[in-house]
Image (cartoon, rainbow, N blue to C red):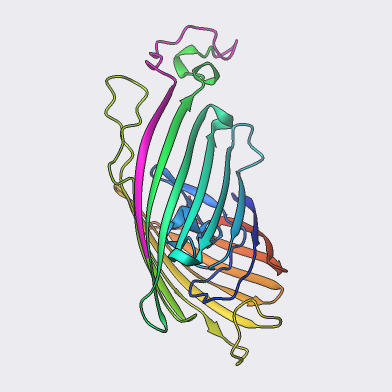
Amino acid sequence: MNGFFEANIILMKNIKGHLFIIVLFVLSTIESFGQDPIFSQYYANPLYLNPALAGSTLSPRAIVNYRNQWPSLAANFVTYNVSYEHYVNDINSTFALLANNDRTAGGAFNATSISLIYTYNLQASRDLFVNLSVQGSVSNRSLHWEDLYFEDAIHPVYGLNYYSSSEIPPDKTSIWFPDFSFGAVVGYKDLLYGGIAIHHLAQPKDGLYNRDDSKVYRKYTAHLGANFNLSGKQSSWNSKRSSILSPALLYQQQLNFKTLSAGLYYTYNPIMVGAWYRCNIANPDAVVLMVGLNFNGFQVGYSYDITLSK
């Protein structure tokens, strides 16, 4: 049974205000579809999902993610992610910082990005809230060529790098480039929420060969969800002994790579559990299970993907 896990920690300083977006930020797992990592528990990394989710709690919030995919392998996939956001009440705005590092093949290839996010938090009516956001990033792709092994350099008896490979090294082993994204979120009370995001608007080139026209294709995201208070009390999701059921749906597409995730969270403070199903539209991918704890504005969780595909 293949799988991978990730640790996630969130620290929030609560202030009085409206909470219109689910904030069950628990452990997230990710798998690669196309060029960008995709988080199974995508609300555990809200700013990576949609920059317009900045300010959804109207309070300062810090999040740390660690993902280790197939840890039993020597050359596995490890991802680090941190974010911080701060809401400024006087101008109805949120400023945020997001940093992400994705290490492939034991660190032979690295993708790093640092982003600044601005979100305008608009209260359109008593119960309707709208977030509009822009994101500017600087990204890096780096390759440790000396850590790679090629088939034509392998001897059937004497092993790796016995022969000289005919593979041509890249013209450069590191490249930096700017990147821009946009997001929007709409929420009704604490009940319904939904959003869209478009990442890599300019489709920047990220090839390491001078002749390479490789680029980061646009990624389109649409997400939708709801919160149902089963406790029958007029209290927010994080009240003591509140009972909240939160179904959600996510669709993402990057070039020809598509993924659809559907599932739900159940919260009975301080315990959170969840179950998800993910597919690439045509074929099943994984069932995702999650468990976590929420206490005093601090949340921690664990999630595991059970692979269904061959």
Residue 166: percent from left, percent from top: 40, 10
Looking at the rendering, the stretch of residues picked out in magenta corresponds to 156-184
Magenta region includes residue 163: yes
Residue 238 visible in the snapshot? yes
- Please tell me in which quadrant of the rendered image residue 91 appears: bottom left
Residue 295 vertical position relative to residue 216 in the rendered view, above or below: below
Horizontal side of 153 relative to 244 (left or right) equals: left
Residue 177: percent from left, percent from top: 37, 32
Marks counted in the figure total 0
Residue 72 vertical position relative to residue 282 in the rendered view, above or below: above
Horizontal side of 175 relative to 202 (left or right) equals: right
Secondary structure character of the magenta stretch overall:
loop
The residue at the point 60 percent across, 78 percent down is 237
Residue 167: percent from left, percent from top: 40, 14
The residue at the point 48 percent across, 40 percent down is 114
The residue at the point 47 percent across, 71 percent down is 248
- Please tell me in which quadrant of the rendered image residue 194 appears: bottom left
Horizontal side of 203 relative to 106 (left or right) equals: left
- Please tell me in which quadrant of the rendered image residue 223 appears: bottom left
Residue 88: percent from left, percent from top: 50, 62
In depth, the one of 198 and 278 nearer the eye is 198
Residue 282 visible in the snapshot? no
